[in-house]
Image (cartoon, helix red, strand yellow):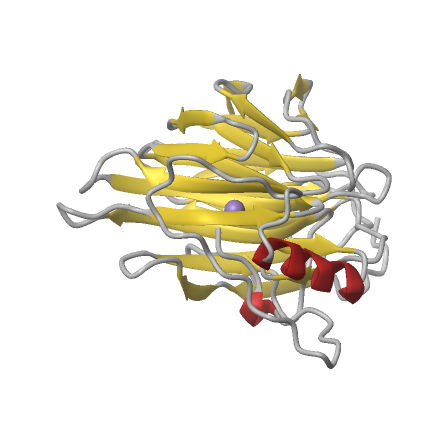
Amino acid sequence: MTTPQPHVFERITARQHALSDTLTVARSLPHRSRRMIGAWCFSDHIGPAQFPADQGLHVGEHPHTRLQTFTWMIEGEMLHRDSLGSDLVIRPGQVNLMTAGHGIAHTEDSVAAGARLHGAQLWIAMPDSHAECAPAFDHYPQLPQWQAQGVQWSLLVGSYDGQNAPTKVFTPLLGLEVLHTGTQPIDITVQRRANFEYGISALEGNWQALSDAEGADTAGIPMDELTYWAPGSAQAWTLRLQPGARLLVLGGEPFAEPMKMWWNFVGPDNAYLQQAVADWQAQAPRFGPVEGGQGRRLEAPAMPTAASSGSSARTGSA
Ligand code: MN
């Protein structure tokens, strides 16, 4: 029963990042001590926020390569437009999945000023076997959702407890939300796979892990602190959720391929990223125009000539 465990647990505090003049997001990935969880390579928790009466979020036209942007909406509405001609509003309980492949560009705009906004946007690195595919956009208006153990489960990506999410990804991944709407603390069991690594964080409320086979100190983990769990254990967690807690459980097989990031690009090496920056600045057809967005077109920051192996300071705009 008592298998010796390596160091398998980390607590990562998300850093606050200004997404616009009026909106700060909590960014937990990439972090200097943890770049990825499976193929999940970027994680922004947006809100919960209330915009001033005349304001909203307007992210101007910007590109992506070799990743999928994954948006999970909890409160509010955003209008997505992209260079494929997609023009669609995402609403609470829905997922948008944009597959950049060789290249895509998009915009994101609040539907109404003065609204509330709460959601998560994550990126999924694509494996070399698919990374140069044609771009695509998929909208999932409904995901598997069920009640069990006194809480509500929503399966956003992958398979869990006999449920399968339709979300099209290219490596073994899990995205699972657990919501406790009751008024008393509750203990739940969450399964895990030995070949997956995991990250658990709260999008609302507080929680703790009661099963501590790893010797983890998990008392009272607040919103936006990411706990990382290395592969190697299939022992289920017992988690205690405080009233109102909303957990996001990310999992996946460790991503073993070379993967570099610069700004909104993923690439296998620096030369690829340099080319993507040049193509965007030259308005190359690779990224195509996006019609109708309200924000201004974003400029790609130049890469330093001395190779940087993942300066997260320059990663991501949305
Ligand atoms: Mn984006």
Whether residue 150 can be seen here = no
Q: Is residue 132 left or right of residue 251?
A: right
- How far from the left and from the top, in percent, is residue 198? 68, 48
Q: Which residue is at 58% across, 59% downward?
A: 281
- How far from the left and from the top, in percent, is residue 240? 49, 44
> Disc count in the image?
0
In depth, the one of 67 and 119 nearer the eye is 67
In depth, the one of 177 and 311 nearer the eye is 311
- How far from the left and from the top, in percent, is residue 237? 64, 43
Q: Quadrant of residue 249?
A: top right
In depth, the one of 277 and 70 nearer the eye is 277
**Residue 223 drawn above or below residue 107:** below
Q: Which residue is at 65% across, 40% downward?
A: 100
- How far from the left and from the top, in percent, is residue 279? 65, 55
Q: Which residue is at 79% across, 64% downward?
A: 271
In depth, the one of 281 and 23 nearer the eye is 281
Whether residue 256 can be seen here = yes
Q: Residue furthest bottom?
A: 306
**Residue 126 drawn above or below residue 6:** above
Q: Is residue 271 left or right of residue 30?
A: right
Q: Residue furthest left?
A: 53
Q: Which residue is at 23% across, 35% downward?
A: 112
Q: Is residue 78 left or right of residue 149?
A: left
